[in-house]
Image (cartoon, helix red, strand yellow):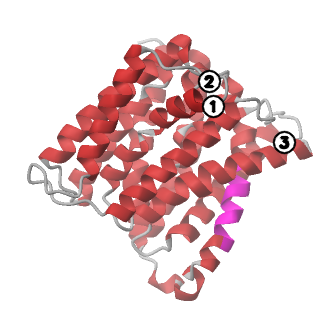
Amino acid sequence: MSQNRLRLVLAFLAVYLIWGSTYLGIRFAIETLPPFLMAGTRFLVAGSVLYLWARRKGAAAPSGVNWITAGVVGTLLLIGGNGGVVWAETRVASGLAALLIATEPFWIVLLDWLRPGGRRPGLAVAAGLLFGFIGVGLLVSPFDLIGGGRVDALGAAAVVLASLSWAIGSLYTARGARLPASPTLATGMEMLIGGALFFPLSAATGEWAKFSLAAVSLKSALALLYLIVFGAIVAFTAYVYLLKNTTPARASTYAYVNPVIAVLLGWAFGGEAVTGRVVLAAAAIIAAVAVITRQQAGGQSPTRASRPTGELATDSPTAR
């Protein structure tokens, strides 16, 4: 195997396995760490590293407009997107959260269609949307289907809203958001602002009053460290490498591989049940995401698969 091919394989493995494992990592981290405080710490540290790294590599200093734009994107992606996920995982399984967050491409297609002058989805994308929402309905149904038990409605709703917030942030980015040309710098800025905003949110929800450093377990501390080093920094670097060295369609395959990894890891290491309901819903959602993502990569919609490299970093699952 050539050196370049080996690097590609390792980059794909990093994006598939690491980003797929972040959902279980979040679950372990919030066992003894308050959700919003954990997320704020994660993104402030990771954002500082990415920002300083990008500047050291020669990225130009961001303008005031860049910072404002990064603040808007960071709020939508991190506070609305990741914040919804970390809170929801106090109520739902990590694998279920991963499956529901995978519906982001559905929202992007629908929002892009509904906006003034939007693009109507083609037949294949429409079929993918229908199939995907059937899968979501099966997953969150209040009825005990196929022996799968009931899903916490509030937790599931939080993840769906998080996915919607992520989609809005993604479309905002695609529609000319004025971010730095360097994806590493832009992501670092978004993490810095989003991470900082988690702290007042943590205080407002009473997390600080209940938090005790002595109560934090080694398992949660290591999970947080994993989310910072691998989930944010290593996997993001691998993703940027893929964007520069392979096709957008291939790079975007993480969208339907990550949920499978998350479900399997949750079952193997988190004791999460993989019921008939979860299997059928996962098959429907992942198939739908695969169809929609591939169609978008062909240029039908302005989603992550068809954007220039400088914009892709802002809606990657680095922050999930």
**Residue 251 as seen in the image, left or right of residue 72:** left
Mark 3 or 1: the one toward you: 1
Kind of residue indicated by mark 3: Asn
- Determine if residue 218 is in view: yes
In terms of secondary structure, where does tag 3 sit? helix
Instruction: Determine whether 252 is above or below 43 in the image.
Output: above
Location of residue 229 with respect to 220 vertically, above or below:
above
- Write down the quadrant of residue 240 in the picture: top right
> Which residue appears farthest toward the left when viewing the image?
147
Task: Give the class, few, some or many, for how many residues have Cα within 10 Å of label 2's Cα (few <14, many ≥20).
Answer: few
Q: What crowding class fits label 1: few (fewer than 14 Cα within 10 Å), some (14-19), or many (20 or more)? A: few
Magenta range is 190-200
Q: Is residue 92 left or right of residue 192?
A: left
What is the CA distance from the residue labelled 1 to the residue labelled 2? 5 Å
Viewer-nearest residue: 305 or 246: 305
- Sequence-wise, the earlier of marks 2 and 3 is 3
**Magenta residues: mostly which secondary structure?**
helix
Would you name the residue on which mark 1 appears? Answer: 115
Q: Are marks 1 and 2 in contact (CB under 8 Å)?
A: yes
| Residue at point 39%, 71% (across, down) | 31
Rendered image: mark on residue 118: 2
Residue named by callout 3: 66
Across and down, in percent, residue 81 comes to 55, 51
- The image quarter containing residue 291 is top left
Q: Residue at x 42, y 62 (%)?
A: 88
Where residue 38 appears, x then y in whole percent? 54, 67
